[in-house]
Amino acid sequence: MAKREAETLTNEEHQELLHLNEQIEQLQAQRIEYLAELARMRRISLTALMENLGIQTQMYV
């Protein structure tokens, strides 16, 4: 993060960062899909399920 903020990433590091961000986004989307399925099975909203389980929305910058 410090190298990114200082704008000292090499091209390879930048590409790796982009790849890792993409992986995180894919995993988060899959996680939400699984939570939505569990919410349907329990017949409650996704928001209610997340509140019941103490799951907070994660924000990545």
Image (cartoon, rainbow, N blue to C red):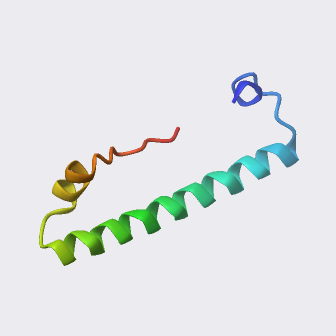
Percent across and percent down for residue 27 are: 53, 62
From this viewpoint, which residue is outermost toward the left?
A: 43
From this viewpoint, which residue is outermost toward the front?
A: 53
Percent across and percent down for residue 3 are: 77, 27
> In the drawing, does residue 11 fall left or right of residue 50?
right
* Residue at point 70%, 57% (across, down): 19
* Residue at point 20%, 55% (across, down): 47
> In the drawing, does residue 27 fall left or right of residue 21?
left
Q: Nearer the viewer, residue 5 or 59?
A: 59
Percent across and percent down for residue 61 are: 53, 38
Location of the N terminus by quadrant is: top right
Percent across and percent down for residue 45 are: 15, 63
Look at the picture and state if 37 lies above or below 11.
below
Q: Nearer the viewer, residue 25 or 44?
A: 44
* Residue at point 20%, 77% (across, down): 41
> In the drawing, does residue 32 fall left or right of residue 26?
left
* Residue at point 82%, 35% (across, down): 9
Q: Nearer the viewer, residue 45 or 41?
A: 41
Look at the picture and state if 58 lies above or below 8.
below
